[in-house]
Image (cartoon, coloured by chain):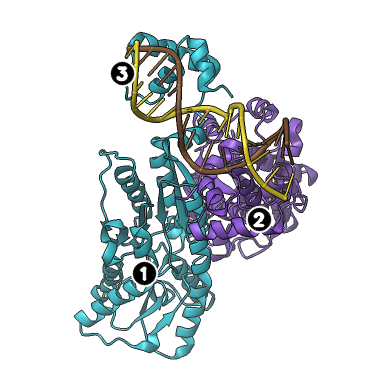
Chain colours: A purple, B cyan, C yellow, D brown
DNA sequence: CTGTTAGCGCATTCAT
DNA sequence: ATGAATGCGCTAACAG
């Protein structure tokens, strides 16, 4: 591979001049610029980005740490992140945290050691304190899907509480009085926020919150199955259930169907997230839209703006969920 | 960030010695090794991988180019790739090709310029010739989900033909005589291979292949919907349909349900891929298992073995699909 | 506008 | 077993 030195020899100029034409910025006479360009073309020169990084202390790569890569959420998010960053010639280095504090922290350090210029984090296990501390360090970070008041400008998040409210509110508007709830894991922030919204909707209509009708799930299909099973065998009376995400809703619906319960005739179901598959579940799922791709794009924009000084990139921090009415919930 | 120099000062040894303990190989007395280790811990030292790369001419990063990041396939694949590589301290740089030849080629060069030690490619639009040529270059590549005879050892792929055969064969075994087929895009290799398998099963049982019952889809839900609509309005008679992937099967089922067709009572459906959601579709989908995660892991192993000389990593190139019988196909 | 020089943090000879 | 010296390819002052 030809180096900058080879090019300088070929063009009969100095090392620095070649570097200048590579990095556009500085002033080089058009004539020597052409000489250098010609030499580069002739030698098939390609800058060694590793060397560039070491010398300039800018790696042009941003680390993205997500809790998982499979599942319906992170794909769309990553697509937007990759596209936005790639458009500005930035590399995306990924790491998976598996919602485990130790792994998440190791991932942060792993990414750090790679000399990332910034970190986009979608982490669940890392504590607020750790993240606040990290944000004070030299490496810029932006959090997706998490709200920490102390570092609010670094957060790109969804108003989960409102989403939870909207889901339950929709059911109440349809005349349901006894509404069950299958929540996400209690140790996940978004899960708790959604639940708070559910309770607010209930309270607002003077409906009693019955702990027996609130089951903790795991955000996966199995969690929805188990939750529905528990609800069904619990003996509590309910005409509708809101699931804290669509995957659990799908699991819940599948056990209902197996047991001969008709959806929505016998039981109304509302999901959360509006994953692509939601409209291919039978019945099509009424749910709350979660704009993950938008949030991914915003995280990338945040980095572009704050780290790479791209003034073009406008950043929005909070996203509002919206109800998506389809066929899984009907009038009581 | 502490450097190797800081550590050497702290430990009272030389730069070179610290480098030696980092790279395990060389002989260092256990005593000084401990001193160095202690100093590293105390300073929270992390090697600067950029500098390591420049000095050693090994970037410890692997480029992964996939056609898409959303959808049900690439997530599980990436998870395995990331896990296997990460376990050996290799970084994963991702790029998305969007099944577009120009984008795919640009991505390859993008990854190349970042100094990746190897490339894992899941590409559909790039020509065989280009890939064969690329494989002759200095940068090792491994292909996932594609078979090119000339560079077979570089390919990690599924026996798609067999999968197509198994799906149709299952239906034939159930007594179906008129079997429709919704294929993937004709320009995708795996789509055509699956179709070949379908026709082989038909031929083997002396069943006629009716072009009117074979619709080209796009591998997405909409493709399944459109395909089924075409089939239904085509007037052709069929008691079963195999869809070239589960997403299309889900779309196809959804239009059937809307039109009052019962699955599987009125129509048997078989999918392909066994995506996680397949068992939450109602009825649970009978399908052909596609071990994407295994293939991802193998691609990573290939790189570990051939690029990083990790003899531990055993590589398998071909994977065999298996029929997964659930509830969407029954006796004719 | 262009050339000289000194590192960036580390691996790797070559000595000792 | 350990240290000193050199260079990976490039950027970034600093001169001129």
Q: Is residue B37 above or below residue A275?
A: above
Badge 2: few (under 14), some or many (20 or more) residues near its Cα, within 10 Å? some
Element assignment for label 3: loop
Q: Residue A230: where, in percent of width, then height? A: 50, 43
Residue linked to disc 2? A32
Say left or right for C6 vs A201.
Answer: left
Task: Confirm whether residue B139 shows in the render.
Answer: yes
Q: CA distance from mark 1 to mark 2?
A: 38 Å
User: Residue at left 79%, top 47%?
Assistant: A205
Task: Confirm whether residue A66 shows in the render.
Answer: no
Badge 1: few (under 14), some or many (20 or more) residues near its Cα, within 10 Å? few
Chain bearing mark 1:
B
User: Residue at left 46%, top 62%?
Assistant: B281
Residues marked 2 and 3, same chain: no
Element assignment for label 2: helix
Q: Residue A219: where, in percent of width, then height? A: 54, 45
Chain bearing mark 3:
B
Q: Residue A243: where, in percent of width, then height? A: 60, 49
Q: Contact, CB < 8 Å: mark 1 with mark 2? A: no
Q: Contact, CB < 8 Å: mark 3 with mark 1? A: no
Q: Residue A234: where, in percent of width, then height? A: 53, 42
Residues marked 1 and 2, same chain: no
Q: Nearer the viewer, residue B292 or B176?
A: B292
Q: Is residue B321 above or below residue B302?
A: below
Q: Is residue B146 above or below residue A177?
A: below
- Of badges 1 and 2, nearer the viewer stands 2
Q: Report the disc number at residue B27.
A: 3
Q: Nearer the viewer, residue A241 or B8?
A: B8
Disc on the earlier residue, 3 or 1: 3
């Amino acid at each position: 591979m030809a180096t900058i030195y080879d090019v300088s020899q070929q063009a009969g100029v100095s090392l620095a001049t070649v570097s200048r034409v590579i990095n556009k910025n500085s002033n080089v006479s058009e004539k020597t610029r052409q000489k250098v360009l010609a030499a580069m073309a002739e030698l098939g020169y390609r800058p060694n980005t590793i060397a560039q990084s070491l010398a300039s202390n800018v790696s042009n790569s941003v680390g993205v740490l997500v809790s998982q890569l499979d599942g319906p959420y992170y794909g769309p998010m990553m697509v937007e992140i990759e596209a936005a960053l790639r458009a500005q010639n930035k590399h995306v280095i990924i790491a998976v945290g598996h919602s485990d504090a130790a792994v998440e922290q190791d991932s942060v350090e792993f990414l750090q050691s790679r000399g990332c210029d910034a970190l986009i984090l979608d982490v669940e296990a890392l504590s607020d304190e750790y993240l606040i501390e990290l944000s004070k360090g030299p490496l810029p970070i932006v959090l997706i899907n998490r709200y920490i008041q102390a570092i609010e400008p670094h957060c790109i998040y969804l108003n989960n509480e409102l989403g939870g409210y909207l889901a339950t509110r929709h059911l109440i508007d349809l005349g349901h009085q006894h509404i069950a709830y299958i929540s996400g894991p209690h140790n996940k922030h978004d899960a708790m926020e959604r639940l708070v919204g559910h309770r607010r909707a209930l309270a607002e209509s003077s409906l009693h919150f019955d702990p027996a009708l609130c089951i903790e799930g795991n955000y996966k299909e199995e969690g929805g199955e188990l939750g529905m099973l528990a609800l069904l065998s619990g003996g509590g009376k309910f005409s509708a259930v809101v699931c804290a995400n669509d995957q659990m809703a799908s699991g819940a619906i599948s056990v209902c169907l197996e047991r001969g319960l008709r959806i929505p005739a016998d039981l109304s179901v509302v999901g959360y997230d509006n994953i692509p598959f939601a409209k291919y579940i039978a019945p099509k799922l009424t749910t709350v839209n979660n704009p993950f791709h938008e949030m991914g794009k915003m995280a990338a924009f945040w980095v572009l703006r704050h780290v790479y000084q791209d003034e073009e990139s406008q950043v929005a921090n909070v996203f509002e969920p919206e109800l998506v009415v389809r066929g899984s919930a009907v009038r009581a």
